[in-house]
Amino acid sequence: MNALLIVAHGSRKKESNDEVIQLARDLDAIEESPFDRVLCAFNQFSGPTVDDQIAELAGQGITDITVLPYFIAAGSHVVTDIPERVDQARERYPAIRFNLAQHLGAFTGIKRLILEAFSGR
Amino acid sequence: MNALLIVAHGSRKKESNDEVIQLARDLDAIEESPFDRVLCAFNQFSGPTVDDQIAELAGQGITDITVLPYFIAAGSHVVTDIPERVDQARERYPAIRFNLAQHLGAFTGIKRLILEAFSGR
């Protein structure tokens, strides 16, 4: 059983956080997804936290968690905060395998995504 | 002559801003792009600003500028700051057509991008 945990910055605006929650729900509902579960967490300004969601997934018998820093670029959250939380989770849940993915902005498909979005121009 | 202006939050970390600058350069170098020019600007913590880059593009004879808020979710920068700057630019450069695009997180291709990135699992 594996899971994707999408970790976003978090905003004081509820609507902004709701976008990420909806993305996780949409991905969680996709049958042919490589993940059995998809959840999201927020670094600031909103729960659930990374720790909350890892505890939730551990309680569901998930054995493999991919953490996706859902960030445009590698600022301090991507470089420091999220890796530290993943390291702490590795110590706390030695039976779970954690995979820290690249942040979204480093995905090679981003350029194609942008060009395709405007290709009808 | 049209241009894409990628507007990112900006970071105190130079490496973070450099990622966005490199993305803009890479897109600018793609021959089959729908845009004659691709530049980026930052909302905070770094230049060039949106105003700087619009002035630059206006000086190059660009007549059509698409502004892409390069943000994960619609916080205050996406909802308020960037639209205000685009409105000001519309008043200042009436001969240029401005198109304010959706922020990156609202692109319909984001889900596919994420699933494809992990599809080898």
Image: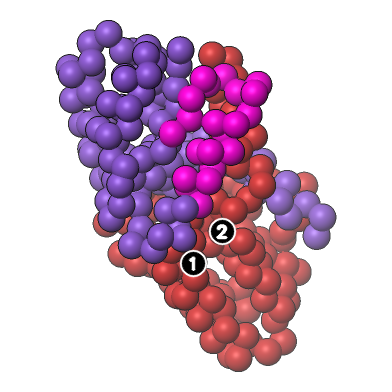
Chain colours: A purple, B red
For label 2, the residue is B103
Magenta span: A19-39
Q: Could you tell whether B111 is left or right of A52 in the image?
A: right
Quadrant (top left/top right/bottom left/bottom right) for the C terminus of chain B: top right
The residue shown at (35%, 58%) is: A11
Quadrant placement of the N terminus of chain B: bottom right
The answer to which of B28 and B120 lies nearer the viewer is B120
Task: Mark 2: give few (<14), some (14-19) or many (20+) Cα within 10 Å.
Answer: many
Left or right: residue A121 compared with residue B56: right
For residue A94, which quarter of the picture?
Answer: top left
Residue B41 visible in the current orientation: no
Q: Is residue A24 magenta?
A: yes
Q: Can residue A1 be seen in this snapshot?
A: yes
Label located before the other in sequence (2 or 1) = 1
Instruction: Using the image, tell me which numbered label, if any, was put on residue B78.
Output: 1
Q: Position of residue B107 (x, y in %)?
A: 63, 50
The answer to whether mark 2 and mark 1 are in CB contact below 8 A is yes
Counting from the top left corner in percent of width and height, residue A28 is at 55, 31
Check disc 1 and report its element: helix, strand or loop: helix
The chain containing the residue under callout 1 comes to B
Position of B117 relative to B23 (above/below): above
- Kind of element beneath mark 2: loop
Give the Cα separation between the discs numbered 2 and 1: 7 Å
Residue shown at 57% from the left, 19% from the top: A34
Q: Is residue A28 left or right of residue A4?
A: right
Is residue A35 left or right of B30 when viewed as pictured? left
Is residue A72 shown in magenta?
A: no
Residue B74 or residue A77, whichever sits in front: B74
The answer to whether residue B105 is above or below residue B43 is above
